[in-house]
Amino acid sequence: MVDRISDSATFAGFGRGASRYSSGPLTFVRSRNSKVGASEFAFAIPRKVGSAVVRNRIRRQIRAVIDQLATESRLPEGAYLIVVRPDARGSKYSQLMEWTSSALGRAERSVVNDH
């Protein structure tokens, strides 16, 4: 199940001590206050990435990647803030899939190793 993050406690968990996993121009920050059994995502896409049209396109593409990973049962549980850097502008779906899979794969291995 993939949701959007809506509670302030989860957002507070993105501060100091949160785990970060980067791949290409994407950084996934895992909240310390994650709900068990769910995958939640929020986005931080600064104006430097491009116009609102460009930022929204990237957001939609990454959401599609996340939906595909969820369908394939390759999505780790937790709450993630996805930080997008300007280098992501103009990226193809396949490249976004590679970066997202790589970062979330490291996140999943880290969670498994911590338990």
Image (cartoon, rainbow, N blue to C red):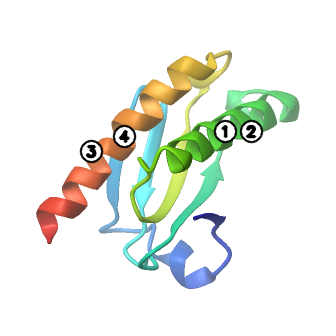
**Type of residue at label 2?**
Arg
**Residue under numbered circle 4:** 103
Query: Is the residue under label 4 in contact with that under label 3 (CB below 8 Å)?
Result: yes
Mark 3 lies on a secondary structure that is helix
Task: Tell me the SS state at disc 4.
Answer: helix
How far apart are the alpha carbons under marks 1 and 4? 16 Å
Mark nearer the viewer, 3 or 1: 1
The x, y position of residue 68, in whole percent, is 58, 40
- Give how far apart the Cα atoms at labels 2 and 1 are: 6 Å
Disc nearer the start of the sequence (3/2) = 2
Q: How crowded is mark 1: few (under 14 residues within 10 Å), some or many (20 or more)?
A: some
Query: What amino acid type should be assigned to the residue bearing mark 1?
Result: Ala
Callout 3, which amino acid?
Arg
- Taking 13 as reference, is 104 above or below it? above
Tag 1 and tag 4, C-beta contact below 8 Å: no
The amino acid on which the numbered mark 4 sits, given as a three-letter code, is Ala
Q: Which residue is drawn at 49% across and 59% down?
A: 80
Q: Position of residue 38 (x, y in %)?
A: 50, 71
Of badges 1 and 4, the one in the foreground is 1
- Secondary element at image label 1: helix
Find residue 103 and report its horizontal and vertical position in percent: 36, 40
In this figure, which residue is indicated by the disc labeled 1?
Answer: 64
Q: Between 107 and 84, which is closer to the camera in this rendering?
A: 107
* C-alpha separation, residue under disc 2 versus residue under disc 4: 18 Å
Residue 106's disc is 3
> Is residue 72 depicted above or below 17 in this figure?
above
Foreground tag (2 vs 1): 1
- How far is mark 3 from mark 4, CA to CA? 5 Å
Q: Is mark 2 on a helix, strand or loop?
A: helix
Label 3 and label 2: CA atoms lie apart by 23 Å
Residue depicted at x 55% and y 47%: 71
Name the residue beneath numbered marker 2.
60
